[in-house]
Amino acid sequence: MAKVLTPRSESYSQWYNDLVLKADLAENSAVRGCMVIKPYGYAIWEKMQSVLDRMFKDTGHENAYFPIFIPKSFFSKEADHVEGFAKECAVVTHYRLMNDPDGNGVVVDPEAKLEEELIVRPTSETIIWNTYKNWIQSYRDLPIKCNQWANVVRWEMRTRLFLRTAEFLWQEGHTAHATKQEAIEETETMINVYGDFAEKFMAVPVVKGIKSANERFAGALETYTIEALMQDGKALQSGTSHFLGQNFAKAFDVKFASKEGKEDYVWATSWGVSTRLMGALIMAHSDDNGLVLPPKLAPIQVVIVPIFRKPEELAKIKEVAGGLIAKLRDRGIDVKFDDNDNKKPGWKFAEYELKGVPVRLAMGPRDLENGTVEVARRDTLSKEVVALDGVDEHIVKLLDDIQTNIFQKALDFRAQSTVSVDTYDEFKERLEEGGFIMAHWDGTPETEQKIKEETKATIRCIPLDQPEEEGVCIYSGKPSNKRVMFARAY
Amino acid sequence: MAKVLTPRSESYSQWYNDLVLKADLAENSAVRGCMVIKPYGYAIWEKMQSVLDRMFKDTGHENAYFPIFIPKSFFSKEADHVEGFAKECAVVTHYRLMNDPDGNGVVVDPEAKLEEELIVRPTSETIIWNTYKNWIQSYRDLPIKCNQWANVVRWEMRTRLFLRTAEFLWQEGHTAHATKQEAIEETETMINVYGDFAEKFMAVPVVKGIKSANERFAGALETYTIEALMQDGKALQSGTSHFLGQNFAKAFDVKFASKEGKEDYVWATSWGVSTRLMGALIMAHSDDNGLVLPPKLAPIQVVIVPIFRKPEELAKIKEVAGGLIAKLRDRGIDVKFDDNDNKKPGWKFAEYELKGVPVRLAMGPRDLENGTVEVARRDTLSKEVVALDGVDEHIVKLLDDIQTNIFQKALDFRAQSTVSVDTYDEFKERLEEGGFIMAHWDGTPETEQKIKEETKATIRCIPLDQPEEEGVCIYSGKPSNKRVMFARAY
Ligand SMILES: [Zn+2]
Ligand SMILES: [Zn+2]
């Protein structure tokens, strides 16, 4: 059977594009930079959402919804914020169309011009802090811990499905606190939630750390990040959590009376992950045959393909499979029985490989006679014949094994791809091989900028668990007391 | 305790506004016509979403996501559709801001003008059918049954929280079929899903019917609706399902090859419910003390208020309550234990009444001694003292009773408020009392329009279960073979 995907060795980026399209995850739309998320891709996103939403609620957050539009003037209130987002905004200027006087369809009605333009939200700090102003008078109103699931728009010039699109789906948490300490703790709690989600559900190992000033969120005092390594050796920023200090409270004049009756500005955090996680999930595990999905996020965890020639054979297989399906569903496993007779088993095998279904069962008349079933696992592509009796137990364990195995594989790959270097020459050399490079840096934005210009590598983060270590900056030779993590990134 | 809400008898519309604000459901934002849905209101919407989403999946639908923007030219492709929506569209004309040369914040960058304006979706038929064009070649690609949960924007001039807002949240299903018959069946299936949801979960009885031509969705051949009656005697359209014929397939040139190899245009449906349902839920059941929520959609189904003076008393109550809470949660019931000691029990009682929590338990030291607990139900405001032993069983049954009771109450109210009239004078007289009026109509848009102009009443629907009956139109005296349902409406 002909390969439907460009092999990774030939072109990793073409392989990615092929995979997103062929596995029915997403496609480009008629609107520049905006994607259509197809049902199979959306089903994965829904599984992500449902796990994350549970984690947010378990850490004391509530969902809410704020307007998609932000008055232009709100944008200017926080200087760094407007600087960071103004260059890529969709702007609503009118609120009505009219029939073209020349008879060519519809045109914008010039009389329906807005007094103040509205920005389609690229992120919601400004509209939310303008709202919080009315919700907060005293320490008794704090903390506020809201999350919203929403679409946002950033007018990116070069877009790629899931990784960088003009419109994307995300969640954004926005919290308000009485003390700096509490806000910092919240920021850290949420980067840990993201890290746990990435590792335990996506099976993607991540490095948690702090962004350098150059890479910080526009308006934040500190940005925490989780950084994942893709198979091509590039980093992918997968989630961020921002300590915003009192910046937005000051911009929107949000003060509270403390227990002691003193007035102070409120402390803020914000944190988000987006459909970009789909890109990370796809790129971290998949192979030249298609997607490899971690069982915990696979919309179909087990597929059963009957092998038959005659309807009587199918009927018998259906009966036996029915019992197994009931048992698996009882255990909360998503099972599909594919008896579509327009397609041959071989076609189906390739299709479910392409779609990353973790476990595939094949059942034919001979299996029924022998009381067996063929079990194939997607991650290793290996097959075994298993007794039908007790196969449900076997599958539960197998799904766990697959989840563990693909995480371990990604972890091993990252270990192999992480190096420490001590000179700029070595840095540039190793960079060509991809991966994470731990190196000393003098702590200045200027040095970081120079390295970026010369090599396209950026500081992905200053890892939280990085030990102190005396050294000299690979670029400037100035003293440094900690290595930071460099990489080329998506 | 002073009433926090304007009584319904004084002003029903002020009562509604008070309730939405005071119960922390939603509020107006800084953006004209756009609302903020607050956590408590959003929690109700989430419960609605989760039930509806299950119902959609059980009827064979998948979720997907399509772009928020629609190229202006797509809009003109279906004549009725553009006519229906062009007058209330948010239009994106630019994609960048820049620093004001005069130093006043940011302004729209005139160089970043879009070649073609983008409309913020008011509904997605056009962008979706433009996408389906690429998904459909043959009958094997059909049916397609997608749903999307999304925000939409219609630039309404007079807005009211939940009932009519410029931005609202909704779901929109869009299906594609090989035959007319199948599309009609889908349209009917979905209006039945909506009807079941309204009656079994929202406890709101609805009349299912077909819209007259005047009230049809822009671009549909037939619009099915569910109509609910509010306490002030006005109707609220709560969900619609449209048979779109081949209109959108023709507008976007979506053809398929049939089994027999013939080419034909694809048949379409679309259907949606929105955060407007929140308005229906609030107005159908609530009273002058606050919200009355059906247990099946209440974020908090049971609240336990401890009555104590000393910390030792609280500790004992907590212990006993803990056992009960565990039992209730095991049965899937959402319970809150409110031991906030900044607020008095009386304040809490009023607060949970305002928020419509179906069952409230009060537990004091004397209750512990007697092995009892005070159980209050929100719908009837009655209280009883119940033995603690077995109270979990009691509560499960009570929640069922409340669900049934508020539905029955709404059903009785509707029965009392539905009348048949045979003359226009009687029609006008009864209209002042509110309610549904069954009357003969000659079937012409002109008559409907005249009645609307003269009385502000519209034909809410031609009920599906309305028997044939010879009669004459109350307005024109022309023959009619069926009564239709009139009302003033939200
Ligand atoms: Zn950007
Ligand atoms: Zn409208």
Image: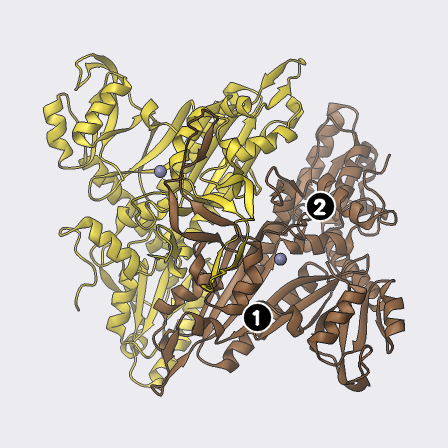
Chain colours: A yellow, B brown
How far apart marks 2 and 1 lie (CA) works out to: 39 Å
Q: Secondary structure at mark 2?
A: strand
Residue flagged by tag 2: what amino acid is it?
A: Val
Asked whether the viewer can see residue B387, the reply is: no
Viewer-side residue, B459 vs A225:
B459
Name the outermost residue toward the top. A479
Which residue lies at the image location 24% right of the left edge and 44% below the top edge?
Answer: A409
Residue hosting label 2? B302
**Eyeballing the image, is B398 above or below B82?**
above
Chain letter of the residue beneath label 2 in the structure image? B
Mark toward the start of the polypeptide (2 vs 1):
1
**Which quarter of the image is occupied by the C terminus of chain A?**
top left
Q: Nearer the viewer, residue A242 or B26?
A: B26
In the rendered image of this protein, does residue B114 appear above or below residue A329?
above
Where does the image place residue A320, in percent across and percent down from the top left?
A: 39, 74
Q: Classify residue B124 as left or right of residue B20.
A: left
Question: Label 1 sits on what residue type?
Answer: His
Nearest the viewer among A34 and B62 is A34
B92 in relation to B63, above or below: above
